[in-house]
Image: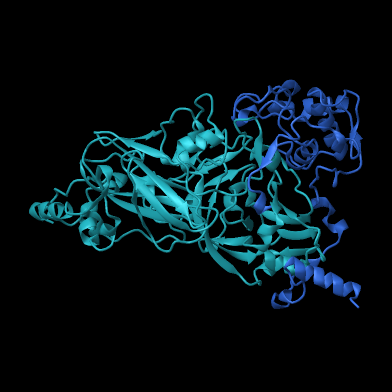
Amino acid sequence: MSISDHRRRRTKSSALQAVAGNGLLDRRALLGRGVVFAGAMSTGALGSLTGVAAEPPTDTPLAEAPWSQEPGATIEPYERPSRFEKNAVRTLNNPNGQPGAQGARTPHHLMNGAITPNGLHFVVSHGGAPDIDPDKHRLVIHGLVKRPLVFTLDALARYPMTTRVTFLECGGNGGPLFSPQPLQANLQALHGLASCAEWTGVKLSTLLEETGIDPKAKWFIAEGADAPHLARSVPLKKALDDAMIAFYQNGERLMPANGYPMRLLLPGYEGNMNVKYLRRIKLVEEPAMSFWEARTYAPILPNGKAYQFYLLQEVKSFITQPSPGLTLKGPGLYEISGIAYSGTGRIAKVMVSADGGRSWAEAALAEPVLSKAFTRFRMPWRWDGGAAILQSRAWDEAGNVQPTRAQFVAQRGELKSVPPVTVVLNHHFNAITSWAVDSTGEVKHAYA
Amino acid sequence: MLTRSGLVAAVWLAFGLAAGAASAEAPNLGKPIDAAEIAAWDISIQPDGTGLPPGGGKAADGARIYADKCAQCHGPDGKGGVAGVFTVPLVGGDPITDIAASMKRIANFWPYATTLFDYTRRAMPWQQPMTLANDEVYALTAYILAANKLIGENDTMNAQTLPKVRMPNRDGFIVRFPDAM
């Protein structure tokens, strides 16, 4: 594209209609005028993401590159990303595997779309990833059932399979936002304990039809074959709704840290309840009050009481681009993009603000919008080079609304002192996250 | 007249699952297994004591086991983890005055003493879970409860006594979404 062409496009794109304060443009620009917008993208956030110069290329006339003048690399049996994408990896809070939990956070700021690749899917591990021989793994279902049964993986593979896309989120995701001051960390550190994948397996209700259910059963205990024998109690209602036992993650077998060879999948429920390395399901009348439900995932409230069995991951969204660390390179047209999800169902709409919540405009949602799955939203934005505060706010189909941080803190409180960013001190934070853009284009975490 | 089996079937249907009909569509590859065959895996303990095994133990025995198998991570006398290990103290606990999870202790937060037996047996020691004998788990449970002054130094913890230990924060919890349960 010549410089004069580029200028013409900029001129043309300036006709995009403003729909809210501080430069938010009509989301239909993403559809009807997509060509215009795509042209402008090279000056936008995507350029700064990859480290590519955000300005039009100056290395013209074009010439052959070295990689175009020799045969490429031999193809590997299992491919890894380009060496130029070495930053798009998970961050670890306990890289030496010391006793205690290990967290691996998804780099949302370096990703796009709605599906998390398996190697980047978040992990919270309470005892490391066991090296399970799938031929020796067993799943037993017992307790208040008519016929206790034990299954091999081969046997389960013959049952009718179901495939669905669903997010998983650690109950502690967003925990740093309980800090009384905004922690200066990137999106990966703040909200990296959530991911979304396509899962394939057998519905738990199918297996319970075979075992039968004693009408006294109201809960089931799910237990893993990992070192802590992690166990959670789940309302039986969920087993009869959409609970499944997953064997495949994005088409391949589960990753070891995500539960190989099988995990419980409870769409929309707190990550820890989706028990990995599932080896036992026991139907019971009352919950077991395991360590993880009675203590760890029971968040303290301002009145000193604590929530128990929070179950749901509530409606939430955050902006992935721009976000801290992705500096804007000069005024112009950008795409604000992010992720919205709800443990209750589909995302109904996402509103975006560029002026700290004074005015809002509706973002475009990328199809398909699936129940209990990540939904990618996009919003065209003309940055004028001044201060801006970017926010997103999601609604789900049940009418649940993502709270503002002030509304959330009024209910759930905040910490008395600023915590280390990797230490999760409370759970189930789903309020609005704010990014402050200054006149240099730098993006910082803010409370607004 | 409704037979007993007819009544059972009606109850099952009312519960929402037709026990026979739908499973006819599935391969029925589950192998029947009895309680004795499951026993080694059936380790969950209910707050009412269901699942607690025979045996018992006292704090004095627990103190010796603790020094040998637990103190290296949890610190002497349960007072806290050693450097670099993410453990909170097993003993003590101020009244909860902040929403920070770091305030949670056994004595000021845990609602049921049975959870202590259950978790210790299934998950500890960190490097060798499920290697403690049941008497050792009872003794360690007694040691930690006694150090927190929740039971007496000479009280024996067993399947009868442990569920009766009243934890101070038993009523400190709220269910978030009762309709989901």
Task: Identify the residue shown where x is 23% and y is 61%.
Answer: A33
Q: Can residue A88 be seen in this view?
A: no
The shade of chain A is cyan
Q: Is residue A283 above or below residue A307?
A: below
How far across and how far down the image is residue A440, in percent? 24, 33
Instruction: Please tell me in which quadrant of the rendered image residue A154 appears.
Output: bottom right
Residue placed furthest toward the left:
A4
How far across and how far down the image is residue A299, in percent? 62, 37
Q: Report the front residue among B2 and A27.
A: B2
Judged left or right of residue A423, residue B16 is right
**Which chain is assigned blue?**
B
Q: Can residue A255 be seen in this view?
A: yes
Q: Report the front residue among A122 and A390.
A: A390
Judged left or right of residue A271, residue A140 is right
Q: In this view, does A240 lie above or below A316?
A: below
Q: Is residue A377 above or below residue B171?
A: below
Locate the C terminus of chain A and report the quarter of the image it occupies: top left
Instruction: Please tell me in which quadrant of the rendered image residue B86 appears.
Output: top right
Marks counted in the figure total: 0
Task: Identify the residue shown where x is 84% and y is 53%.
Answer: B39
How far across and how far down the image is residue A415, in percent? 54, 28
Q: Report the front residue among B162 and A356.
A: A356
How far across and how far down the image is residue A425, in percent? 57, 33
Q: Is residue A210 above or below residue A268?
A: below
Locate the N terminus of chain A and report the quarter of the image it occupies: bottom left
Task: Identify the residue shown where x is 85% and y is 26%.
Answer: B151
Colouring scheme applied when the structure was drawn: by chain
Task: Identify the residue shown where x is 48% and y is 28%.
Answer: A180
